[in-house]
Amino acid sequence: MNLSSFRERFGGEVILPGDADYDQARIVWNAIADRRPALVVRPISVEDVIAAIRFAREEHMVVAVRVGAHSVAGFSTCDYGVVRDLSRMRQVTVDPVKRRARAQGGAHLSQLDTAAQAHGLVCPVGVVGHTGVAGLTLGGGMGRLQRKLGLTVDNLVSVDLVTAEGERIHASESEDPDLFWGMRGAGANFGVATSFEFRLHPMDGTIFQGGVAFPIERSLEVAEHVREFIATHDDVHVALAFMKDEELGGQPVFVVGSTHAGSVDDAERDLRVFRELRPLWDTFGAKPYLEVQRMADVSSGWGQRFYTKAGFLAALTDGVVGLCAALAQTIPLGAELSLWAHGGAVGRVPDDAMAYTGRHAPFNISAELGWTNPSDDEQRIAWGRAAIAKVKPFMTTGQYVNDVVEAGTDGAQIYGQAKYERLVALKRKYDPDNFFRLNQNIKP
Ligand SMILES: Cc1cc2nc3c(=O)[nH]c(=O)nc-3n(C[C@H](O)[C@H](O)[C@H](O)COP(=O)(O)OP(=O)(O)OC[C@H]3O[C@@H](n4cnc5c(N)ncnc54)[C@H](O)[C@@H]3O)c2cc1C
């Protein structure tokens, strides 16, 4: 490995096995993905990103691109190869007049949230602050504001990337529109995104958020209200969970969570329908938006072992609610079946507008399991797989790529056949050697 000539071309940090911070630098969010790269590089400029791509190509090394390191599959690390960690490129700037944010490729959601809120603005992003803007956006970006403001990717105006050839491209609806189409849903396949431009929306700093829990036996009765609510409030976020409540001694519960971005009075009025159903607990209230965006940062912290499996539901029928309620009887503590409503702004975008697939399904459902003891790996993963296999008859086309953990999943399952073929053509054009392959890979 010709490191000395690389160091001359590279302005950032290079961390090697044996260096004091190597073990810290190599780990990722999911402790299951415990790998040992040959080096970790931390570029500080686009020129560094280009130099690191050239170096990996010269050395025939595989490259893992990392921002938030949240890839549950462990795509942002590797054995023997190069981890390109963008953590030193995290600047976010906001133009309050144009209502635009520009986030460097290594920014986290918390930095985008904070910078936008400093001007009374917001970009809809995910629910854990230390998730990378890049990985989230390039796959789609679901979150608490999605029914009101769309997915993160629906608010992406342009993206700058460096290709496998070291070429810089600015992609938008008007420049390289085909590539821009593919970047929005399959973006980890085409290059290293070094900067994102987002549309922002006005939002004061307060939001109404929380949830109510019911004994699992009441799931069907409560689901009736959920269906009615979703049909009549298409800008309010609804997140359902089937789980065991540790504080209630492991009792299986059905949780209706929501984030209402209207006025507090409207939220109180709209969400009363659930709060009046005599729940076991009720955490609804007006809260600072930034606090809500950070509230899962510790419980979703680094170091746990994690598995997820997901798909899109065709409808929230009594059949699927009954099945989820039955699964809650055997679900491990700390796990949940999580259902997020689509519709609203998500459903108003045509499905073929971009690579992201599945937006017209009414719900995304995911089995999410976190644990700490490696000896539980097999049992937890088996539970998640079996649960989603049972839900499969209720599912429809597509899968959210950021929830796909099994490497080698058929791309046509994620994007549908027609979009997959279009993505293969793009991959052949922009990355014919499949240099960027640590992702849900589109094979050229
Ligand atoms: C705790 C937690 C909470 C989550 N919450 C949400 C949520 O609310 N909404 C949601 O939609 N999803 C959520 N996810 C899923 C998340 O969006 C994906 O895991 C996403 O890929 C993470 O991006 P990252 O940058 O943090 O991860 P990384 O592991 O750093 O990267 C993930 C993938 O993106 C690629 N990538 C990263 N940066 C770049 C770049 N600059 N250019 C090109 N490719 C790049 C990597 O190569 C890798 O394939 C969550 C995941 C976790 C673990």
Image: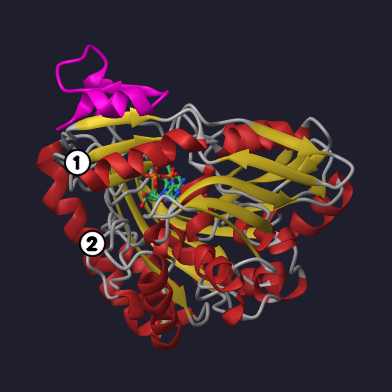
Task: Name the N-terminal-most of marks 2 and 1.
Answer: 1
**Of circles 2 and 1, which is in front?**
1
Percent x, y of residue 169? 55, 56
Residue 327 belongs to magenta span? no
Q: What stretch is highlighted in magenta?
A: 1-26
Is the residue 363 above or below the residue 240 in the image?
Answer: below
Residue visible at 42% across and 39% down in the picture: 49
Give residue 81's mark: 1
Badge 2 amino acid? Ala
Residue 68 in view: no
Badge 1 amino acid? Gly
Residue 24 belongs to magenta span? yes
Image quarter of the C terminus: bottom left
432 or 299, which is in the foreground?
432
Give the structural element (helix, strand or loop) at label 1.
loop
Percent x, y of residue 106? 50, 36
Rate crowding at label 1 as few (under 14), some (14 to 19) or many (20 or more) other CA atoms within 10 Å: many
The residue carrying mark 2 is 407
- How many numbered dots are placed on residues in this image? 2
